[in-house]
Image (cartoon, helix red, strand yellow):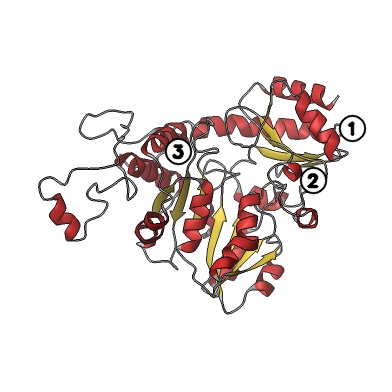
Amino acid sequence: MSSKKLDFASQAVFYEPEPESQSISYPIYMSANFQYGGDIYDQIVAGARKEVNIYSRCGNPTEYKFEEHVERLTGADGCLATASGMAAISHALFGILKAGDHIVTDITTYSSTHEFFDHRIGDFGITVSFVDTTDPVQVERAFNDRTKVLYFEALANPTMKVPPMKALVELAHQRGIVVVCDNTFASPAVCQPHAFGVDVVVESATKFIGGHNDAVGGVITQRSDLLPADWLEDVRWNTLNKLGGALSPFNAWLLLRGAQTLALRVEKQCANAAALARYLETHPKVKRVFYPGLESHPNHENAKAQLRNFGAMLSFQVENEDYGVQVLKRLQLCCFAASLGGLRTTTQLPGTMAFLDIPSQEREAMGIVDGLVRFSVGIEHVDDIISDVAQALG
């Protein structure tokens, strides 16, 4: 049946069964190698790639099924799975850029992304300008004749900044600049950047897509008039296959399984996050709450225009970092940990965890202030989440 006729929740659950066995749970093809029987060798020599199974670093049937499913959920024309979210980011960019090219990116991105832009990518002769992408004027001023990519996050980690996608896409496309958006904090259930003209979307599938904190993976999706129709397959064969960031078959299966409950999980997580944000906004020990669903959020209007819901991520500021540590150590139901997007409510202090290796002046410029606490809100009963946070705040 055509998944385009289905609601997102049904699209998430449904995929065609495996043809041979009619299994409604797609099999795990736990094979690194495949036999070249029959005319398979002749097809490979003639140029066949995805039509035949060659070697699991080049592609695997379970991975292909996961890619097909994510392609539908994101409204894309193609999807490539990778070993992690950072592999998705680096492989997508190296599939577009070469030495001498220039990127404009938001100053506030995930810590590893920021560090990749701040020094590692320069080793390959690529230059980067950091701006606040919520201000299109700053973005336009940063463009130059060598700019090939504009990069931002749909919901910025960890400040929940929401850039105006349509305006940024228009600015970039007028100059032939490819727009790349990291949608990890939102997930396809909350935001679909391709609908606003974004060319390439990257996500850490480890987070909301997988949703169970049990598999690491990433995805790159494409819907673009600026890139060739076969761009993702070129990235598969000339970037991912050479750099080796392939997704394992078992993780592909786990992420495919997790994606089927994406809509259900995220609907509950968003409702819990909104309730927790409202509670925190009235708490005397909380200085400020950053949640795009609150009218106090500076990009609330952008969020209303671009997000189906306001997301399951929020952050808030307490008096100082030491007090923030005390709060998180006192949590009993909520989990003090590094990652996000899973079933359990998970918390961290970005300044002294994910962003610890970034100099303090840069962190402050990114909006990562002293005492900033980040919450990935889970599916527990909302009263229990709020009660745990209340006792932890004291």
Give the residue at x 75% y 22%: 388
Q: As rendered, which of 357 and 98 lies closer to the eye?
A: 357
Mark 2 or mark 3, whichever is nearer to me: 2
Q: CA distance from mark 2 to mark 1?
A: 16 Å
Instruction: Give SS at disc 3.
Output: loop
x then y, percent, for residue 97: 49, 68
Q: Amino acid at mark 1?
A: Pro
Give me the C-alpha separation between circle 2 and circle 3.
31 Å
Residue bearing the label numbered 1: 284
Q: For the residues labelled 2 and 3, say whether their Cβ atoms are less than 8 Å apart.
A: no
How crowded is the residue under tag 3: few (<14 C-alpha within 10 Å), some, or many (20+)? few
Quarter of image, res 150? bottom right
Q: Earlier in the sequence, mark 2 or mark 3?
A: 3
- Asked where in the image residue 345 lies, by quadrant, the reply is top right
Assign the N terminus to one quadrant of the image.
top left
Question: Horizontally, is 205 left or right of 37 in the view?
Answer: right
Residue marked by disc 3: 7
Foreground of the two, 249 or 286: 249
Number of callouts in the render?
3
Inter-mark Cα distance, 1 to 3 = 41 Å
Q: Is residue 137 visible?
A: yes
Give the image location of residue 182, x and y in percent: 56, 52
Q: Work out whether mark 2 precedes mark 1 in sequence or the reverse, and give the earlier one.
A: 1
Q: Secondary structure at mark 2?
A: loop
Secondary structure state at the residue bearing disc 1: loop
Which circle's residue, 1 or 3, is located before the other in the chain?
A: 3
- The residue drawn where x is 54% and y is 53% is 193
Task: Pick the residue in front: 332 or 126.
Answer: 126
The amino acid type found where label 2 is placed reads Ser
Name the residue beneath numbered marker 2.
296
